[in-house]
Image (cartoon, grey):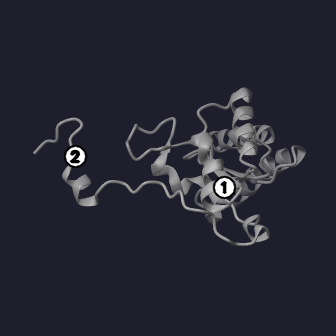
Amino acid sequence: MSVAAGATSMAQVAQGPSPPLDHGSPTAAPAAKLARISIMAFNFASRLKLPNAPASPDRVLEVFDIPQYFADTYGVHNVELQASYFASTETSYLTDCRARIEKAGSRMTQINLEFGAMNISIPDAVQRNMGVDLTMRWVDHAVVLGCPRIMINQGQLVADAKANAIAALRRMSDYAKTKDVKI
């Protein structure tokens, strides 16, 4: 049985429509406690309008709207975004993103990097070095965004990869320190 374009599939019927985004009021937790919490937007990926994701009625939240949504809905003003959520790395785009974050009274606390096989543990030196170079570029982007931290995906940390992983992480960290960013 095929489903015509625009028709509802059996899986969608069984699952039902996606619930609307929660727009409740923030918790009554003290501001000092909420200031220690950060929300990773990755948990909302299925609801985000992302640059490389197919359009869907479930995707109702623009990336630039995440800080305001987290502030209004949860009272949380610390935001973590995946690098892949940015439609551009042009300085003007990143500056606009930072302005939207600040408009919500929020700040970006971490950028999460996922470069597939290009990580500090991969045996292939070319792929490993490409991952280091990309991380360094994202350190520069973090400065524009006012973000103090980058989280890397380290890959498979096995004994054979230890020396290369340590050297790669050291290169990343040494560069990040010059920009006052932590890896």
- Whether residue 113 is visible to the viewer of this picture, yes or no, is no
Determine which quarter of the picture holds residue 141: top right
* In this view, 142 is above or below 36: above
Above-or-below relation of 183 to 140: below
Amino acid carrying label 2: it is Thr
| Residue 43 location (% of width, % of height) | 53, 57
SS at mark 2 in the image: loop
Q: 81 or 13, which is in the foreground?
A: 13
Identified by mark 1, the residue type is: Ala
Identify the residue at image location x=67%, y=61%: 75
* Residue occupied by mark 2: 8
For residue 71, the mark is 1
Judge from the rendering whether residue 9 lies leftward or rightward of residue 76; answer left or right. left
Q: Position of residue 51 (x, y in %)?
A: 51, 35
Q: Which of 39 and 183 is in front in this view?
A: 39
**For mark 1, does the 10 Å Cα neighbourhood hold few (<14), some (14 to 19), or many (20 or more) residues?**
some
Image quarter hosting the C terminus? bottom right
Q: Position of residue 46 (x, y in %)?
A: 45, 50
